[in-house]
Image: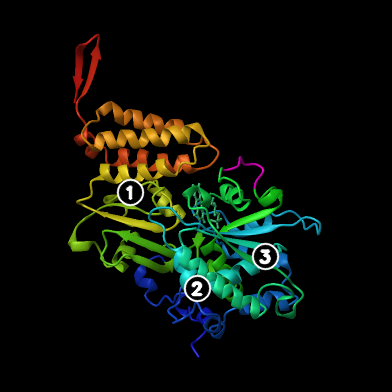
Amino acid sequence: MTESFYFTMEATNGTPQTKAGDWSNYQRVLLPPIRDLHKLEVYEENGGYKALREVLANSDWEPSKVTDEVKASGLKGRGGAGFPTGLKWSFMPPVDPDIPRFLCCNGDESEPGTFKDRQLMEYNPHLIFEGCLIANYAMSIKTCYIYVRGEFADWITHMERELAKAYDKGYVGENIMGTGFSTDIVIHKGAGAYICGEETSLMESLEGKRAYPRIKPPFPAQRGIWGYPTTINNVETLACAPIIINRGGKWYAGIGAETHPGPVLYGISGHVNKPGVYEYPTGMLITDLLEVAGGMRGGKKLKALVPGGCSVPVLRAEMIDGVTMDADSLRTVGSMMGTGGMLFLDEDTDMVSFLRRVTHFYHHESCGQCTPCREGTGWLENLVTRIDEGEGNLRDLDLLLDLCDQMEGRTVCALADAAAWPVRNTINRFRDEFEAKCKPAVFATGGEVEAVVD
Ligand SMILES: Cc1cc2nc3c(=O)[nH]c(=O)nc-3n(C[C@H](O)[C@H](O)[C@H](O)COP(=O)(O)O)c2cc1C
């Protein structure tokens, strides 16, 4: 029998540390190196469903105590915004037996540069199920939907097979493990659009409607799926719940950065030697994570880093020294942790072409509900394309920044912000490259050339 993966993180006992060197003995808890862990029997052999049994069978674990433990862990959502998870759970209204309530596990994962949830779904689906069940218990929820990106057809089939086994074994469904607690999990195939990952669009999509975001407030805990109280959490966030119950919130809070603790799945991509998903604590030095991913490909120099999925502000190479992967440290250099998807770009990267691809994505994915986003994302792409093709001028740069002003904070959801931030920051931080591709600006009046600015 393999050693229980929940009890192998001795190296991390307690004190927060910040260097990869300090974490050389780090033992993975989200994606431990155990063959066939996705199979129920292997998961059980390795301590699986022990946390669920503990909270359901031990009368000390009142539902509110589970939420308190998650609060004590300091866990912050891994879906991008980093909202404290225990606090979110506590927003659910008092239980009314006549009013249904829902949990939604967000596995839509469609942002370029973000590819960690799919690893969990493939290699450790029961950890996700167990996390959902614990969250359901904590919030007295009877139904959890796992919303999986539609394109992940293989993972959906494979998760459904494993979920059926968990039902057969009595971990899900009626009277779970004879404890009297009943709750269901439903896997729902997503509608194939990035916007479906935004929590309120996701609820619309689940209800069978077009995925247009809803205005908040009311927040999902007040009016969620079909108007009933709902909590929405990312896949990786919920997968932390069994770990927190097994090891205790205090233990979890001691892993990684003090203000943003816990293990994290870093999705490292771009021009590195060993792209992939790496599990380490928060608070790792960016330079150490680059080393973990085998350094820059072909010995090239690093030019830029997008630290948290393509929506977050890009950093110049010289900005990352001493910066760690946690919200506070990244804030000091004007960026964010986002989803932990780290895109390293080498010295040969054309930052204008890079931004062109990013703007194409957001233009393609805007749902079109709000004018600033529907029109703005199109204009961002048009202008960046014009500059990339050598047809733009310096005034286009100001126009782009002005467009960002007109988009940020002016739409129902944050897709417009996510589209504007990379534009604003890539221009501000690599302006020389944009200027080099611009034609001199020509101001014409009545057919006469008045001034040429270069
Ligand atoms: C356009 C857009 C797309 C999003 N896509 C996802 C997604 O695929 N997965 C996800 O967990 N969160 C996504 N989010 C964030 C969710 O709205 C929500 O904040 C998150 O699921 C909450 O989970 P957490 O508190 O566990 O982080 C997206 C947000 C926006 C604005």
Q: Which residue is mark 2?
A: 124
Above or below residue 270? Residue 61 is below
Q: What is the x, y in percent for residue 139?
A: 70, 62
Residue segment shown in magenta? 213-219
Q: Quadrant of residue 163?
A: bottom right
Nearest the viewer among 135 and 8 is 135
User: Which residue is located at x 64 percent, y 65 percent?
Assistant: 135
Residue 249 shows in the view: no
Q: What amino acid is found at the position of numbered circle 3 in the picture?
A: Asn
Mark 3 packing: few (<14 Cα in 10 Å), some, or many (20+)?
many
Q: What is the x, y in percent for residue 361?
A: 38, 45
Is residue 334 toward the left or the right of residue 301 in the image?
Answer: right
Q: CA distance from mark 2 to mark 3?
A: 19 Å
Magenta stretch holds residue 435 = no
Q: Which residue is mark 1?
A: 315
- Identify the element where label 1 is drawn: strand
Q: Which residue is mark 3?
A: 136
Which mark's residue is nearer the viewer, 2 or 1? 2
- Identify the element where label 2 is drawn: loop
Q: What amino acid is found at the position of numbered circle 1 in the picture?
A: Leu
Is residue 207 toward the left or the right of residue 337 in the image?
Answer: right
User: Which residue is located at x 67 percent, y 67 percent?
Assistant: 184
Mark found first going from the N terminus, 3 or 1: 3
| Proximity of marks 2 and 3: CB atoms separated by less than 8 Å | no
| Proximity of marks 2 and 1: CB atoms separated by less than 8 Å | no
Q: What is the x, y in percent for residue 19?
A: 37, 67
Mark found first going from the N terminus, 2 or 1: 2
Q: What is the x, y in percent for residue 156?
A: 51, 66
- Identify the element where label 3 is drawn: helix
